[in-house]
Image (cartoon, rainbow, N blue to C red):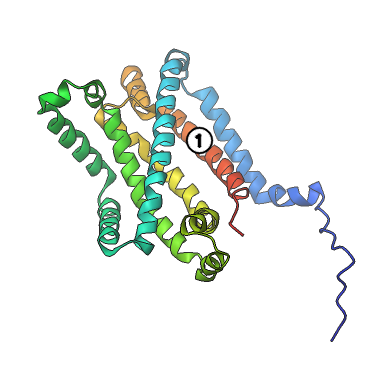
Amino acid sequence: MPDIDIVTPIHPAPALPLRARLAPLLMPHRLVMAGLALAALLAIITQMEWSWLPVYLPKIGDGLLVTLVLLASSVIAGFALALPLGAVQVTGPAPLRWLATGFCTVIRGTPLLLQLWLIYYGLGALFAQFPEIRGSWLWPYLRQAWPYGFLTLTLSFAAYQGEIMRGAFAGVPRGELEAARAFGMPRLMVFRRVWFPRAVHRALPTLAGEIILQLKATPLVATITVTDLYAVITRVRQDTYLTYEPLLLLIAIYLCLSGTLTIVLRWLEGRVPSGH
């Protein structure tokens, strides 16, 4: 049997020089594509009409804030709801498992716009029929459109992410859970120290994609009079009779938001403990 050296430390591989790391970016076809993109950007800036932008910039900022608040709140609330939805489909009793599966199936199988209209026009009309609700402290909020947009986005994100978490919880090796119980950990500690972090670490790559999809779903709330970023851009088009410039600005904003989210989520993915 060959001898194994367990004394000499293993040094990490040396980092590649900067030129070697930049070599893929300096390939001819990529340089050509970058040049074409830069030329197109310069043409858009110099040849199109942008005199309206300073006038509408405060409204665009307000619409962007509404979009970001809706995105962040619906993702946080939806993920909190997705955790029990995913866990109960793996280990819950049969009635709860059926309810969770049915909820995810219905929400994932119907258009988000249809859900938004059903909740807004259905619940909104239903609440208005009860004098107790109209006289309560909730009515100033329930008569607005944004709670229904928030609820719809939250339920949609919870259904999709709940199905992802179901697969993540089921994918954690059973031997790891049995080993944790063998150490005397109670069920809650096994969930908190092993099962939950391992499942979240498995689901993070898909979670990033779901958050990007959630961002692209937020313009639908403009159909129920929520003044988000898309609603402001639509108003700009109606006021200025311009078509391409406002839409190009909207595309640029969403691209920046998507790129920022992707970078942040990839950074977060490498720093979330995997439960090992």
Q: Amino acid at mark 1?
A: Leu
Q: As drawn, which residue projects farthest toward the front?
A: 184
| Residue 31, image quadrant | top right
Q: Residues within 10 Å of mark 1 (few under 14, many from 20)?
A: some
Q: As drawn, which residue projects farthest toward the bottom?
A: 1
- What residue sits 37% from the left and 25% below the top? 233
Q: Position of residue 50 (x, y in %)?
A: 47, 19
Q: Position of residue 130 (x, y in %)?
A: 11, 28
Q: Position of residue 271 (x, y in %)?
A: 62, 48
The vertical placement of 262 against 98, above or below, is above
- What residue sits 25% from the left and 30% below the top? 224
Horizontal placement of 233 versus 118: left or right?
right
| Residue 126, image quadrant | top left
The vertical placement of 41 against 182, above or below, is above
- What residue sits 33% from the left and 51% below the top? 159
What is the count of numbered marks? 1
Q: Nearer the viewer, residue 118 or 250?
A: 118
User: Quadrant where the C terminus lies?
Assistant: bottom right
Q: Position of residue 110 (x, y in %)?
A: 25, 51
Q: Nearer the viewer, residue 1 or 230?
A: 1
Q: As drawn, which residue projects farthest toward the right?
A: 8
**On the image, numbered disc 1 is attached to which residue?**
257
- What residue sits 30% from the left and 34% below the top? 149
Horizontal placement of 175 versus 225: left or right?
right
User: Quadrant where the N terminus lies?
Assistant: bottom right
| Residue 183 seen in this snapshot | yes
| Residue 163 seen in this snapshot | no
- SS of the residue at dot 1? helix
